[in-house]
Amino acid sequence: MLNTIAYPGPGEVPLIIAHGLFGSARNWNVIAKRLSDSRPVVSVDMR
């Protein structure tokens, strides 16, 4: 993993999001921000 983007949220168990073949962690910004209302979210770059 080269990069991670963390979205703090309530709760202890984070949701981990990985992008598709030609994407990046930033592809999930809008969705991750909304999901972080109910739990921590970590978006990772796998390239």
Image (cartoon, rainbow, N blue to C red):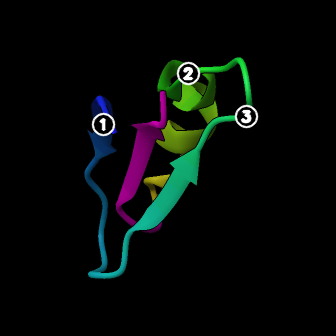
Q: x, y percentage for residue 28?
A: 60, 31
Q: Residue under circle 2? A: 24
Q: At x 74% / y 28%, what residue is drawn? A: 21
Residue 25's disc number:
none
Q: Residue furthest right?
A: 21
Q: At x 66% / y 20%, what residue is drawn? A: 23
Sequence-earlier tag: 1 or 3: 1
Q: At x 48% / y 38%, what residue is drawn? A: 33
Q: In this view of the protein, which residue sits in the foreground, 29 or 17?
A: 17
Q: x, y percentage for residue 19?
A: 63, 36
Task: Examine the rendered structure and indicate whether residue 40 appears above or below residue 5.
Answer: below
* Secondary structure type for disc 3: loop
* Secondary structure type for disc 2: loop
Say which quadrant the N terminus sits in.
top left
Q: Residue under circle 1? A: 4
User: What residue range appears in magenta?
Assistant: 38-47
Q: x, y percentage for residue 6?
A: 28, 43
The answer to whether 27 appears left or right of 38 in the picture is right
Q: Residue furthest bottom?
A: 12
Sequence-earlier tag: 2 or 1: 1
* Secondary structure type for disc 1: strand
Report how far apart the C-alphas of labels 3 and 2 lie in the structure.
Answer: 8 Å
The amino acid type found where label 2 is placed reads: Ser
Q: Residue under circle 3? A: 20
